[in-house]
Image: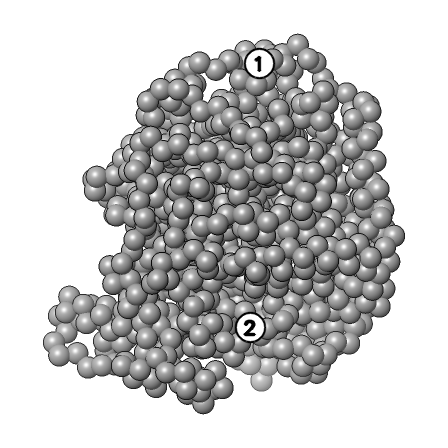
Amino acid sequence: MGSLDSKVPAGPLADKWTKHKNDINLVNPANKRNIDIIVVGTGLAGGSAAATLAELGYNVKTFCYQDSPRRAHSIAAQGGINAAKNYQGDGDSPYRLFYDTIKGGDYRSREANVYRLAEESVNIIDQCVAQGVPFAREYGGLLDNRSFGGVLVSRTFYAKGQTGQQLLLGAYAAMNRQINRGKIKAHNRHEMLDLVIVDGKARGIIARNLVTGAIERHSAHAVVLASGGYGNVFYLSTNAMGSNVTAAWRAHRRGAYFANPCFTQIHPTCIPVSGDHQSKLTLMSESLRNDGRIWVPKRKEDAEAIREGKLKPTQLKEEDRDYYLERRYPAFGNLVPRDVASRAAKERCDAGFGVNKTGEAVYLDFSAAIERYGKEKALTSGIENPDKETITRLGEEVVAAKYGNLFQMYEKIVDENPYKTPMMIYPAVHYTMGGLWVDYNLQTTIPGCYAAGEANFSDHGANRLGASALMQGLADGYFVLPYTIGDYLSDDIRTGPISTDSKEFEEAENTVRERMQSLLDTKGTKSVDYFHKKLGKIMWNKCGMSRNEKELKEAIAEISALREEFYKEVSIPGGMDEMNQELEKAGRVADFLELGELFAKDALQRNESCGGHFREEYQTPEGEALRDDKNFRYVSAWEYKGEPKDAVLHKEELEFENIELKTRSYK
Amino acid sequence: MKLLLKIWRQKNNDSKGKLVEYPISGIEGDMSFLEMLDVLNQELIEKGEEPVVFDHDCREGICGSCSLQINGEPHGPDRLITTCQLHMRKFNDGDTIVIEPFRATAFPVIKDLMIDRSAFDRIQQAGGYISVNTSGNTVDANAIPVEKDKADASFNAATCIGCGACVAACKNASAMLFTSAKVSQFALLPQGQVEAAERVQNMVRQMDLEGFGNCTNTGACEVECPKGISLENIARMNREYLTASARG
Amino acid sequence: MALSGLFLVFFLGQHATINLSSVISPETFNSWSHFMGYNPVVQYILQPILIAGVIVHFVMGIVLELQNRKARNVRYAQYKGGANAPWVSRNMILTGLVVLAFLGLHFYDFWVPEMAYKYIEANPEDPTRYHHELVEKFLSPARVGIYVVSFVLLALHLWHGFASSFQSMGVNNKYSPAIRNFTRLYAIVVPLIFIFIALYHHFNHTH
């Protein structure tokens, strides 16, 4: 067990980043032309990093598995992006954003990184507006803000329910400008399959052209991994179907430590699973909890009747409903943080109060909001003594104006009208706080290999606040990495082009080929999805919203056995030298089968409950999370040693010099 | 539900494709269209046959990956949704469903139902951006006020997901709705004015080079667009283009 | 396309007005026709422009159609055009070609004899001949039939084309619904005038 150097600069918290930028080495513009950088993944972090690095003068090569950088899954982020602009004059500041993020992350993130994030947040908004990102505006023409869960100020900038889309298209546009200048060579429909290390430094990747199947060698002076999170280890998640851990995991196999794999965010408001055919889950924005009330029936008989279709939720009287969040957390009510809301839903459903045919759903009810808004609207429209129908009509109009697109999306999927009958929701895997361990410069434990965005273990600790993922991705890509990578590359100005003919490239390419060939040669009887679904079930049931020692141990054994079965039984039609979607999936699932076990192992060693990681053994008598700052105030970073069971734990102790550690309470 | 699928199978761009019939059963109304294809693919894999290749990713209607011409319409019979949001309850037991790739000379078939839409990327690369460096020193965001209507109209244009349904629906395989949406997004914002003339000319030139057809204002694109991008954008682009050309 | 189309729409209106005078007052018709036929500005400037306009419009129309066909080199096995666009907008080439064929007949009927009369046979000016020449043409029921069918197709062509030209020139604003209503009214009324004239002369002079 070793310790890790986070390379956080000395000095007062607020000065660290400025001082660091002044101290680090720069590469002069003429030399930048001789330096190549590979960026894997073109979402917010990768796209913004690629654009900025190219703009600085480096030769950038981007890689993404999608057919265009514009399709990266950052595009699906709905709610917004936080920035400590204090445009609303409600007392916001970088310090408050920093504080909220550390607290929201349950004190498991690095102070200096989070402060830098809060500091850079303001630049992101300026940059994006200059690029033409059409954020929502007020009638005066200035930017509008909304508030999000877990904080006391309005600091979230948004573009209706498509903030991620607009920001990603902004980064994509910035990339396009550099592609047009010839500074970025975009390799779309390519997948990174290995990291090449020469003399201890990351010097390139092996990628597969997904259209032709060709295995390609690409060299560079540094490699940036911005390949997103690993939520799809659960099979069902709100991630895109193609989202995967492969780039990060192959780097992990080459020596990059993997940090906090068990920190996963389960988002409370998703559309419930409807059957075994389900391929993915759809998120309903957190903003719905501003107006929706969450409940289940008070009596089990009623819940059963609802499940069997004998009773309608609207027939249930007010006193027969259990608004369990309002009951348990009177202060925050329906607006408790995501982890708390998710666990509470699971607790009710496990106790037999679930309301859909699978028993895994709770109601999100807008009838009270419709009535409230309807009365308000009637009053302001000068309608005296409005009847119930008028109130409902007016209220529905107000709710439609706020959430119309979400309601429509719900109706398309579930085929029920959420204005008339309460929505059904259930938690789903949404975001992974864990990822490749990086130091203050976003460098992994492999020199020259950087990780940005959701792919790194990031600034969110054990739980991410809403509207912070976009902020982190763009801060890393636009404002952090372009500086810190220069410090490293300043040693490479005389290196010259990296040859792809070296034995290291040869070895890496052969490894990739052999892995794929052996998968193709297995010629078993079961599809890749069969294994992925099975893995997902294990993860969801035993490493999901709440975990315990016994089940985690079972999970480790089951995943290990499943992995063995996978290599004996998987069936992949087609060959290597052609487009082969099953082969692509097989490679990804093989990595998930290793990551899943490490995930469980990490959860097992963390004998505390914090943020998204809830260990049943560690809770208060009221069922709240019990953190252990004395023994677990660290980042767990795992070193690859072959099998996941042999992975070696390294700890980065977290120092809190500016914030006092407190128990999160939302009572 | 029992269905008869007629799916376009094509090994690669060099080979000729054809419609192949696949009977399928056990389809539920709650399944999305792509989940129905997943079921078919699992059956094919179990039989040792090659599964049907199609593009898809987010499966929530925002990434723009999924395409498919379903019974003669891009993204199928429903409106304002992508194929991944189309549910099987829109079909009836015993239906025959014809599934083809989006067809345009500028969108060559890669395999089966997967097409190459990189022409769209090249149109964007020709000018679909505002040239601003990432310095961290751009003016404060609120130093550029934008009228709310214009900001909203710009946003509406910017919600294009680049799926290509407009091209697929158009009898001329024209990419005007796609191109005009990007031109409009910037034309409506003060930040976009500096490069406006150059932008529209470069993007239109690239669009023509890619081999898309001409706009004859049939309006099919607007009807089939999963994001409801308005024809107003095409008029705006025409206006921008004419004034830019007149100014020389 | 839009510009030449708009120009032709304008010409059509003018043509309809003059022709309409033929059912009201043969004298007015004769004098207007004579003016059009012998005024040097009309004959040597406007007429070539008009002919050029017609040629540009149909040449461009055909070129566009060919380009558009090339833009989809593999056709759909199933294409439900009717689900998202009206028939008229999708069949401009068809309605256009019929109108073009009619134009051929029209040239043969009026313009060729007129040119021959004036410039080849070099007959003297006769300001009263136009009305009876016109009336004589509408004696044949076959010609009137062709005439009526052609103008129905012209109406369809205009129904889409006139409004569409505004969109092509970038006019799409709060006035657009009004413009569209006007263009559609025009698309019906003007061809109806021509049809009315043909029927009027046919039925008034055959018995």
Foreground pick, A132 / A309 = A309
Q: Is residue A348 visible?
A: yes
Badge 1 crowding class, 10 Å Cα cut-off, few under 14, some 14 to 19, many 20 or more, is some
Three-letter amino acid code at the position of disc 1: Ser
Q: Position of residue C52 (x, y in %)?
A: 61, 45
Q: Contact (CB < 8 A) between labels 1 and 2?
A: no
Instruction: Check the residue under mark 2 and report the chain it is in.
Output: A
Above or below, B131 relative to A322: above
Indicate the quadrant where residue B88 lies. bottom right
Three-letter amino acid code at the position of disc 2: Ser
Q: Which residue is mark 2?
A: A274
Q: Is residue A613 left or right of residue B57?
A: left
Q: Quadrant of the C terminus of chain A?
A: bottom left
Badge 2 crowding class, 10 Å Cα cut-off, few under 14, some 14 to 19, many 20 or more, is some
Secondary structure at numbered mark 2? loop
Q: Residue at x 67, y 63 (%)?
A: A534
Q: Position of residue A177 (x, y in %)?
A: 55, 31
Q: Position of residue A87 (x, y in %)?
A: 25, 39
Indicate the quadrant where residue B139 lies. top left
Q: Residue at x 57, y 60 (%)?
A: A550
Q: How many marks?
A: 2
Q: Residue at x 73, y 55 (%)?
A: A563
Q: On residue A574, which mark appears?
A: none
Foreground pick, C206 / B226 = B226
Q: Do marks 1 and 2 share a chain?
A: yes
Q: Residue at x 31, y 71 (%)?
A: A323
Q: On residue A490, which mark appears?
A: 1
Q: CA distance from mark 1 to mark 2?
A: 54 Å
Q: Is residue A166 visible?
A: no
Instruction: Check the residue under mark 1 and report the chain it is in.
Output: A
